Amino acid sequence: MIPRNIQENVIKTLEQSNKLVIVLGPRQAGKTTLLKNIQAQLHTSKFLWLNCDLEEHLALINTTSIISLTHLLSQLEYLFIDEAQRLDNAGLTLKIIHDNFPNLKTLVTGSSSFEIKNSLSDALTGRYFDFTLFPFSYHEIGGTTQTLPLFLTHGGYPDVYLQKDTEIKKALLAKIIESYLFKDILSFSKIRNSPALINLARALAFQIGSEVNENELASRLKIDRKTLVSYLEILEQSFVILRLHPYSTNPRREIGRRYKVYFLDLGIRNQLIGQFNPLALRLDYGKIWENFLVIERRKLYSSTLTPPPCFFWRNLNGSELDYLELVDGKIKAYEFKLGKNKKVRTPPSFLAEYKTKATLITPDNFQDFIQTH
């Protein structure tokens, strides 16, 4: 068993707050295993676990009837609801549970932030804390520079990482995309033009770390810009991609509209474009490195309730920095390079505006960057 970084903070929040605790994350990232590990630490028989993928379990909890919920929950100390996006009215059901069973510790998981948060935003305002469970982080697996190439190639989905055979790894990645990723996305978001969504994901996989031109992308995929924007939102809320927006306090001199896209798992990204060649032979190695560092940094903050906002920076003259964080009102700036002997020079305009020097992250020092806030 590989311990997950968020586990202790999830337990602490569940025990010490009077809020619902929600763990979001893609299917196959290990949410059910996390629940099992948490359950093993509770030592109570007054416990109910419902998996909403199972029809019998869903039928028990898929209600807004206080009489039915009282009959089900009144004697419990803990309630776990797995895959809660299956509920017809997740927000209202969870609101009734929170408001009427104040001593019940409720832990909920969901595979679609798009579905869960849309239904929770109004009904559960002020009633929950949420965490994100990503696929394995490099820190969680105890990664070293020797194991780095495999992780950059096949990613951190638990079933994929734990499989030794590379051909089976690729087959598992294809199955995750086919059976879990897009199947769920298409099911929950009721998209009519499914080929366009898949083609969009592939197009984005080819341009990780580059700024997205929405009009150009929409034209290439033969969909309108409004549809493209909605598909991008769905891919992000379904834990396929992360959008990194530009940071700007001076829009006259800095670019503030276009954003960059990264994949939450590089194995998924490489499977989408069918590229598993040795990294040293790949033209996109630098972009893979950048994607890895951005996502691993977000995984690092996944155990906190308030991860800092993250951005990139670029001005109209073409000067740029790969990654910024805004922590307690202060900017931390970073530049990512593959070459071990590279030097970083903070753009003078950035230094003048923000009084902050950028830190260079290379294969020599990246471990501290992905392990320490």
Image (cartoon, rainbow, N blue to C red):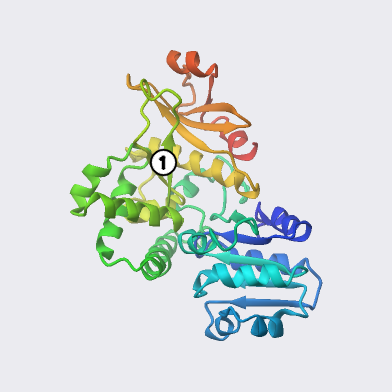
Residue 358 lies, in percent from the top left, at 52, 22
**Where, quadrant-wise, is the C terminus in this rendering?**
top right
Residue for point 44% across, 41% down = 291
Residue 81 lies, in percent from the top left, at 62, 72
Q: Which residue is mark 1?
A: 288
For the residue pair 114 and 31, the one nearer the viewer reads as 114
Residue for point 27% across, 40% down = 213
Asked if 298 appears above or below 120 in the picture, the reply is above
Q: Is residue 146 visible?
A: no
Residue for point 67% across, 84% down = 67
Counting every numbered tag in the picture gives 1
- 185 displayed left or right of 157: left
Residue 261 lies, in percent from the top left, at 38, 43
Kind of residue at disc 1: Ile
For the residue pair 363 and 305, the one nearer the viewer reads as 305
For the residue pair 364 and 326, the one nearer the viewer reads as 326
